[in-house]
Image (cartoon, rainbow, N blue to C red):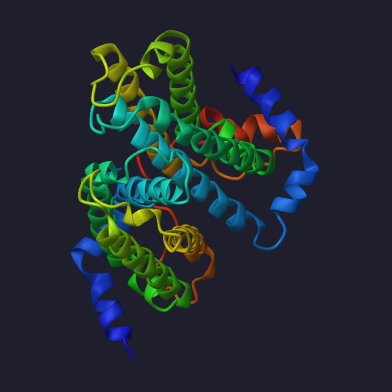
Amino acid sequence: MGGFQIWLHRKLASATIVAAFMRSDWAWPAVESIHFIGLTLLFGTIVVWDLRLLGLLKRVSIAELHRLVPFAVLGFVINATSGSMFLMTEPNQYVYNPAFQFKLLLVAIAGVNVLVFYATVFRRLRLLAPGVEAPRSVKLFGATSLICWIGVIVCGRLITFYRPGLCRAGEPLAFLVECIPPLSSR
Amino acid sequence: MFDPFFAWLESTSFSVWMRESPSLFSFPIILAVHTIGLGLLAGINVALDLRMLGFAARVPLAEFRRLWPFLWLGLWLNVLSGLALLAAYPTKALTNPVFYIKLALIAVALLILRSVRRLWPPDETAPAILQRRSIKPLAIASLVCWAGAITAGRFLAYTYIRLMVDSRPVPRPWMP
C-alpha cells in the first residue's frame, strides 16, 4: 500500500500543466466553486431519483423520470474532472488523507450499486406503470445510493481537517520521512 | 462600529466551542451539514428548474409538491448550520461584501421558488399554467442564482478582509 501511494503520488505530481494552472490567481477557488455546482447537480437529481425508488413520487413514471439521470452523470463528470485537478496539484494532501480515502471508497460503492442496479432490475423497472411502488429489492438500491452520496459529501468536507502537513514531495528521502503520516506525525 | 458586538459574539462559549473544540461534531460536522442542506435545497430546486425547462416533460409538475418537505429540510438545515458557522467567525463573514452577495442571491432564488410554487397546479387535472413560456426565464434565473450563491459561498474562504480571531485549524486528537 505504501509503495502504491508513493507511485500514485509521483504520477499525479507529474501533471505540471494542471498544477501550474491551479496555482494561478483565483483558479483554485473557481474550480472549487465548479466542484460544488457539480455536487448540487449530481446530488439533487440523484435524491429525486432515489426518493422515487423508495416510493415517494409513486405517481411519476420511472421511464420519464429517468430523463433527469443524464444530469446526474454530467454532475459526476464535472466533479471527477475538477476533483482530479485538486489531486494533481496537491497530491500529498489527498493520497495520505483518510477522509479522502473514505470518500473514494463511498464513491466506488455507489458506482457498484448503480452498475448492479442497471444490470439487474432496471429493465423491468422501466415498464412499471405510474402509481405502482417499486419492490423492496429496488428500494435497497435507492437507500444505498442515498447513504453513499451523503457520506461522500461528509467525507469531502472533512478532507480539510485531515490534511497531512505540507511536505517536500519532490525529494525522495524527505518525501518518505515527511509525507507519510505514521513517520511524520510523531 | 460593530467591533464590540463582534468581539462579544466571538467570546461567547458557543462561538469558542465552534472554533476551538477538538470534537468532530463542532465545526467539521456542522460544515458538512451545511453542504448536505445545500445539496437538498439547491439540488432539488435544480431538478425542478430542469423540469421547468422541459426536460422529463411528462413528469407531472404537481408531483414535485411531494419534494417540498425535502426542500424545507434543506433550507432549515442551512439556516441553522449557517447561523452556527456565522457565530464562529462573525467578523470574518459580516465585514466581507461577498457574504451579502451570497445572501442576496439566496433570497432571490427563494423568491423565485415561491413564485413558481404559486403557479403550481394543485393536481394533474388543473390547467397547465406551467406550460406558459414565462416559466423558462424563471428557471434559468433560479439556476444562475444558485450557481452564484454557491460560488460566493466558496469565495468567502478567500476574500475575507478582517479576522479578529485565530482561524488556524485546531489540533484534533483524531487527526493523522
Judged from this view, the residue extending furthest toward the bottom is B1
What number of labels is visible? 0
Residue B95, visible in the rendered structure: yes
Horizontally, residue A139 falls left or right of residue B131, namely: left
The answer to whether residue A170 is above or below residue B114 is above
Quarter of the figure with the N terminus of chain B: bottom left
Identify which residue is drawn at 29% across, 78% down. Answer: B7
Residue A6 % position (x, y): 67, 25
Q: Position of residue A142 (x, y in %)?
A: 33, 24
Return the x and y of residue A107 as percentages of the image width and height.
47, 27
The image quarter containing residue B75 is: bottom left
Residue A14 coordinates in the image, percent (x, y): 78, 35
Residue at image coords 36%, 32%: A49
Report whether B148 appears left or right of A141: right
Residue B84 seen from this side: no
Above or below residue A59? Residue B166 is: below
Question: Which of the two residues, B6 or A119, is positioned nearer the viewer here?
Answer: A119
Quadrant of the frame with the C terminus of chain B: top left
What's the residue at 39%, 38% (across, down)? B58
The residue sitting at the top extreme is A120
Horizontally, is A94 left or right of B115 in the view? Answer: right
Q: Is residue A86 above or below residue A146?
A: below
